[in-house]
Image (cartoon, rainbow, N blue to C red):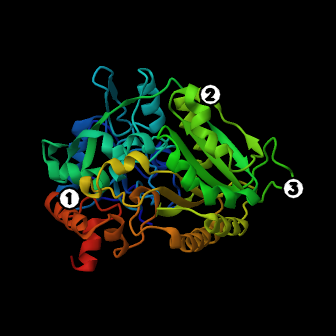
Amino acid sequence: MPDTVKDPRFADFPATFKGRVLRAGESDFAHTRQIWNMLRRDETPALIVQAADRDDVAIAVAYANDKGVPIAIRSGGHGIDGMAMPGDALVLDLSKLKNIDVDPERRLVTIEPGVLLGELDAAGQEHGLVVPAGVVSDTGATGLALGGGIGHLTRRFGATVDNIVSLEVVTAQGERVTASAESHPELFWGMRGAGHNLAVVTSITFTAHAVGPSVMSGLVFYSADDAPKLFGNLDAVMAEAPRELAIALILLNAPPLPGIPDAVVGTPIAAMLVIYTGDLAEYEAATAGLWSLARPLVTQVAESTWTHANSIADPFEPAGRPQYLRGGYMSRIDADLANVALEQLASCPRTTPPSVNCLITLPILGGAIFDHPEDATAFSRTGAEWLYEVSAHWDDPADDTAHLDWVHETDELLRRWATPNAYINLTTHRGAEWLPRAYGTDEKWRRLVALKKAWDPNNRFAYNKNILAAAQELGS
């Protein structure tokens, strides 16, 4: 690793930049370098520049362009590929840009790129509003939105990209541009699903929706023996359920919880996260089909706030550990899928001390996600009735290989149920041949390659699932 304290490459970083400029070895550098996914924990950026305002963003990007180097972008730092703090890189840190403006009359919410989902939820709920987004509180709202955005409100209101009104961005040349249906509409199309490749966002305006203040939410735990019943019948049950009902299946090795038999702790078990955002008087009718499928071991569903409901998944995604995840879409689930997944969980590497370190998660989608056609955005949605995620997190570097191998093996077994396309945010990069398929159609890929060449021809935004690199490798 180079001596980045004395590394001369970025010694001429502009003095007009108002935010903090941090080099390895300096005060706060190690803390600032920490992100949610520490899989690349051995890598150290050469320089981290923390923007104080939008002018700083333009200065940093223009500097990278003039210098002829790529620039890594850190907003929430929740990217599954861990590319927010790559080794030996120039990093533009946007985490301090946290302004949120809520217009309750027009039901619009505008955020800066450092805003996290929990902060977005809290600001919206002051006015009884939500922006459909993700499910873990410390996820960056902007990074999530640029890749699509899926969560508990997807069935009801569509993906996050379906609720974007406009984006203020800085281009690779350091210019400020508005992307919307009226201004640079082709860039607007591409930013909604492939935005990490195209520009740096300084603000996004979303359409918000009335939800709350009270919802129903909680986890329900089932024995492994009942998982095939759930998987085999949920497609039919949820086809009849209102869009206000969302569920996520979670297969895991059982933690010690009241009501979970001691003999079951540490063995595969099924959980279902239930969130209902409609009229509470209709809750029992909306969920009747769920309760007919199997008898739970433990039921924790109760009336709650939206902010509580949308943070229930937080303990499953602890910050600061190495994280690895692969996944995609499924158009159906069945009992065989449950059996394969449970068998794989039994082979999950064990950590010391024991932790819930291996997960197979299947949030339901469908509903409003199909209110928009496949080519409406760069984000792909064909066949997206379910999302599936195979994930692992751990601490000891000696456990890296075992966890990575477990995720790869499990993902390969589950791919027989998967669609060819994928959700870019929630899977690690699978290479050049995979990326065009992930975006859905050949025509969409051609549009994305053309956009990348038009807006970032020198690939300054290269720390991502990179379109230009894939296109060059494929000769497209």
- Determine which residue is flagged by label 3: 263
SS assignment at label 3: loop
Which-is-in-front pick, marks 1 and 2?
2
Which badge, 1 or 3, comes first in the chain's sequence?
A: 1
- Determine which residue is flagged by label 1: 67
Q: Amino acid at mark 2?
A: Glu
Q: Which mark is residue 94?
A: none
Please identify the quarter of the rendering in which residue 223 is found. bottom right
Q: Amino acid at mark 1?
A: Lys
Residue occupying the point 42% across, 71% down? 430
| Closer to the camera in the image, 366 or 402 | 366
Which badge, 2 or 3, comes first in the chain's sequence?
A: 3
Q: Which mark is residue 303?
A: 2
Image coordinates for residue 232, horizontal then vertical, percent: 62, 60
151 left or right of 356 in image: left
421 left or right of 296 in image: left
SS assignment at label 1: helix
Image coordinates for residue 181, horizontal then vertical, percent: 17, 43
Image coordinates for residue 153, horizontal then vertical, percent: 45, 40
Rendered view: 449 above or below 287: below
Q: Neighbour class for label 1 at 10 Å: few (<14), some, many (≥20)?
A: few
Please identify the quarter of the rendering in which residue 21 is found. top left
Which-is-in-front pick, marks 1 and 3?
3
Residue occupying the point 46% across, 41% down? 243
Give the distance between the C-alpha atoms of the residues marked 2 and 3, in whole angstroms.
Answer: 31 Å
Total marks placed:
3
Give the distance between the C-alpha atoms of the residues marked 1 and 3, in whole angstroms.
Answer: 61 Å
